């Protein structure tokens, strides 16, 4: 399952200070070590189901592209009301991404693709592709070291 969460408690606190209400699905952050109590302490409203979130929120922020929801058996785009916005990975240049955008248009949903944000200096803080590539590269090295099962030369201490 997904271990990342779209909004961590520290960012939620900043959004709340800006006057934005933040709703979080119960247990959404558990895989990343962010628990409901932390969100509640920051001032977020923790709700018991995804459908409740989709009903009350004007903007949904999620990690993975919209898909069939395992509990409701509805497509996540169809869970949103017309005029609402979803921000997530979409893959707008892929066939699946184009189908998602078409579905969003038919449903009257604003679908913002975080993976389509330009990779330029001004937008660097929003560049999800580079950050995920960096994490994947780091993880690959850690996994390789684990498989190697010996010390690496070059580790120097003073």
Image (tube, rainbow, N blue to C red):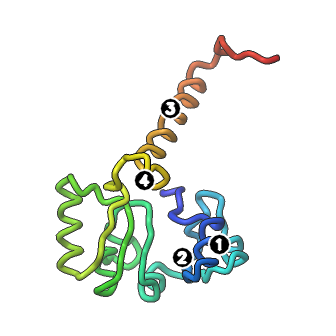
> Label 4 near label 2: C-beta < 8 Å?
no
The residue at the far front in this view is 122
**Quadrant occupied by the C terminus:** top right
The residue at the far top in this view is 153
Q: Residue at x 56, y 83 (%)?
A: 21
Q: Which mark is residue 13?
A: 1
SS class of the residue under badge 3?
helix
75 displayed left or right of 26: left
Q: Which mark is residue 25?
A: 2
Decide: is 125 above or below 103: above
Characterize the local packing of mark 2: few (<14), some (14-19) or many (20 or more) Cα atoms within 10 angstroms: some
Q: Which mark is residue 140?
A: 3
Q: Residue at x 53, y 36 (%)?
A: 139
Residue 104: image location, x then y, percent: 24, 74
Decide: is 116 above or below 104: above
Residue 128: image location, x then y, percent: 43, 51
Cα distance in 3D space between marks 3 and 1: 33 Å
53 displayed left or right of 84: right
Cα distance in 3D space between marks 3 and 4: 26 Å
Characterize the local packing of mark 4: few (<14), some (14-19) or many (20 or more) Cα atoms within 10 angstroms: few
Q: Going from the N terminus, do you reach mark 3 or mark 2 first?
A: 2
Q: Going from the N terminus, do you reach mark 1 or mark 2 first?
A: 1
Q: Which mark is residue 123?
A: 4
Characterize the local packing of mark 1: few (<14), some (14-19) or many (20 or more) Cα atoms within 10 angstroms: many
Q: Going from the N terminus, do you reach mark 3 or mark 1 first?
A: 1
């Amino acid at each position: 399952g997904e271990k990342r969460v779209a909004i961590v408690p520290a960012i939620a606190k900043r959004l709340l200070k800006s006057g934005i209400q933040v709703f979080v699905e119960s247990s959404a952050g558990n895989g990343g070590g962010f628990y409901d109590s932390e969100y509640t302490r920051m001032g977020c409203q923790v709700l018991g189901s995804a459908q409740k979130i989709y009903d009350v929120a004007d903007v949904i922020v999620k990690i993975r592209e919209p898909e069939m929801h395992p509990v409701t058996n509805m497509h996540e785009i169809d869970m949103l009301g017309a005029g609402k916005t979803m921000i997530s990975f979409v893959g707008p240049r892929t066939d699946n991404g184009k189908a998602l955008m078409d579905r969003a248009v038919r449903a009257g949903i604003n679908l913002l693709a975080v993976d389509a944000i330009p990779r330029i200096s001004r937008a660097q803080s929003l560049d999800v592709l580079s950050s995920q590539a960096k994490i994947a590269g780091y993880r690959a090295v850690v996994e390789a070291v684990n498989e190697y099962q010996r010390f690496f030369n070059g580790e120097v201490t003073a």
